[in-house]
Amino acid sequence: MSASHVAVVGGGISGLVAAYRLRRLLGPLARITLLEQADRLGGKLRTAEVGGRAYDVGAEAFLHRRPEAAELVAELGLAHDLAHPTPAPSGILAGGVVRSIPAHTLLGVPASVEAVRPVLSAEGLRRVAAEPDLPPIDLGGADVTVGALLRERFGPEVADRLVGPLLGGVYAGRADSLGLRATLPRLASALDSGVGSLLAAAAAAVPAPPPPDARRPPVFGTLTGGLSTLVDRLAEVAAPEVRLGLPVRGLARREHGWRLEVGPATAPARLDVDGIVLAVPAPAARKLLADVAPAASAGYAEVELASMAVVALALPPGTALPERSGVLLAEGERHADGTPFTAKAFTFSSRKWAHLDGGPVLVRGSVGRHGQVEVLQRADEELVAAVRADLAELTGVTAAPVDTAVTRWGGGLPQYGVGHLDVVRAVEEAVAGLPGLAVAGATLHGVGIPACVATGDAAAARVAAHVLGRVRG
């Protein structure tokens, strides 16, 4: 029997992990074809040279407390390149003042009144303190937007000053459109268990703080050479046949496998394989599954996307930054002259990561929230000027950069709206009925790197089981 041939469509982190796992599961003789429409691998993992330094202009870190990414880094022999943030605290601009992001919250949802005392007004604190006396929350298994629940229980300030900026940093979305169950599952579980107060539910969901003298485990990790190091290593070890710049236009079932239509519409080529992992954004998945899995296609069609841009600045060596790792900006915050801020967040990378200290001072501004199209229509030089003006207003830093880079992520972040878990369940159930096909990616179970790694692992296991079952049968 000839060696198995599988295809992975999508060369982001999910697709690369799937290719790597398929290689491990199917062995060195398997043929693995990795198809990516762009001219590079990595998706939202991209390391550029800025100011002569390797600098991430897409995802900059992964959640270390969730194990998948950290374990993959170790498995690939990259543990010596692993780095964690410095102790510099992060801040939030809300109500015209930069304050430290409070501890003892669940993505900004307070677990106690004291936790948010430095951030809220007297009226905001009164609303939080009074929340347990409101009628008990009963979701009845339904989903709601995070913003609607917070405003009903706490008033506007918790949503606007805390949870909104934090969710905006993760999803480039808004609290008033993101669903509770997909974005704050631990909070939803606590409410489902019968905890009737939002304050009490957050307290139940937030891990207990460690003893004062205990060493706190790192929350985030990255690689000193940039996260493209992970991309390169996955591609090296998976050893797929990489085909860049080729769109996949169609997908059809065959008697014992699948057929892909690849390349330009005027002269498409056909690729016959035993199994496929689809690790592509929602719009591409919707098109490819329209004929073979209409229910899955319909599910993908329900997922909206947000676009954003990263503006990287390399400032002259010695430029003084605040003693913070970065600052989130609440929506609606303005300069002293009334000009709205363009950036939604700043990362002071030379403060946040010890390996970036020394030489040019690196700062990145993140721009763009869901539905905020007009901001991203500006030319690169306009975005740089606007972000520099924001930085000057926020920190007083006016030094002209020695280098800049603008990286745009059009449709880069899926929005987990109300009912997202039901949408994903419907997608996966529909695909489960198609032997040899699996889906992966940020649309499904989380937008962070560990979640994407997990979907790539699961998809590869499903496809490999089908292929190996056929071989052994």
Image: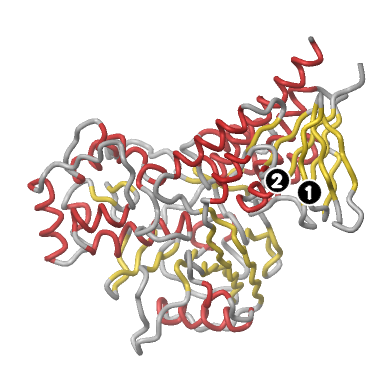
Dividing the picture into quadrants, the one containing residue 117 is bottom left
Instruction: Indicate which disc, 2 or 1, sits on the residue closer to the N terminus.
Output: 1
- Looking at the image, residue 299 sits to the left or right of residue 174; the answer is right
- Percent position (x, y) of residue 250? 77, 46
Residue at (32, 61) in percent of width and height: 100
Please determine whether, in this image, residue 194 is positioned above or below residue 468.
below
CB under 8 Å between callouts 2 and 1? yes
Compared with 206, 329 (above or below) is below
Q: Is mark 1 on a helix, strand or loop?
A: strand
Q: Which residue shows up at 53% across the image and 46% down it?
A: 448
Q: Label 1 amino acid?
A: Val
Residue 173: image x %, image y %?
A: 44, 60
* Residue labelled with disc 1: 248
Residue of label 2 = 288
Residue 298: x, y in percent?
57, 46
**Which residue is depicted at the point 59% across and 58% down?**
412
- Tell me which amino acid carries mark 2: Leu
**Image quarter of residue 433:** top right
Q: Mark 2, residues whose alpha carbon is within 10 Å: few (<14), some, or many (≥20)?
A: many
Query: Is 236 situated left or right of 174 in this image?
Result: right
